[in-house]
Amino acid sequence: MDIKNTRKNISTDQPNNPLHGITLAEILEYLVAKYGWAELGKKINIRCFNSDPSIKSSLTFLRKTPWARDKVERLYLKSARK
């Protein structure tokens, strides 16, 4: 497999997806840095943000729970635009 072609395809596969190339960990770290756990827990009321929060436990939960991940991604898009 040609690495150049693979990289080219990766960058052009989703040109209209604003989250393309951003990991869930990067999104979560950005939100925690911007809001802190307490404010993040108020904005998105899920236990992993409100009860003994950590990046690791939150990532585990968000990867298994599509509705929660969607809320986190939407908050990221909304706050990153400002």
Image (cartoon, rainbow, N blue to C red):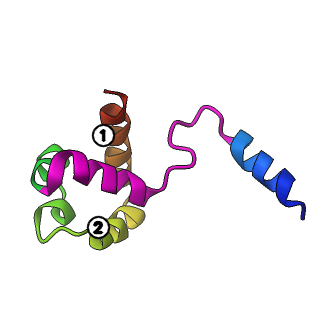
Name the residue type under label 2. Ile
The label nearer to you, 2 versus 1, is 2
Is any atom of residue 50 visible in this view?
yes
Give above or below for 25 relative to 34: below
Mark number for residue 75? 1
Q: Is residue 64 above or below residue 39?
A: below
Judged from the image, the secondary structure of the residue bearing numbered disc 1 is helix
Instruction: Say if 75 sits above or below 59 in the image.
Output: above
Front in this rendered view, residue 30 or 45:
30
Residue under the point 16% across and 52% down: 36
Residue 72 lies, in percent from the top left, at: 32, 48
Q: Can you say which quadrant of the picture contains the C terminus? A: top left
Residue extending farthest right: 1
Drawn side of residue 9 relative to residue 56, left or right:
right
* Disc 2 from disc 1: Cα separation: 16 Å
In the image: residue 23, left or right of residue 50: right
Circle 2 SS class: helix
At 32% from the left and 50% from the top, the residue drawn is 30
Q: Does the magenta stretch include residue 29?
A: yes
Disc number placed over residue 55 in the picture, else none: 2
Residue at point 73%, 40% (across, down): 12
Tell me which residue sits at (18%, 60%) in the image.
49
Q: Quadrant of residue 62?
A: bottom left
Mark before the other along the chain sequence, 2 or 1: 2
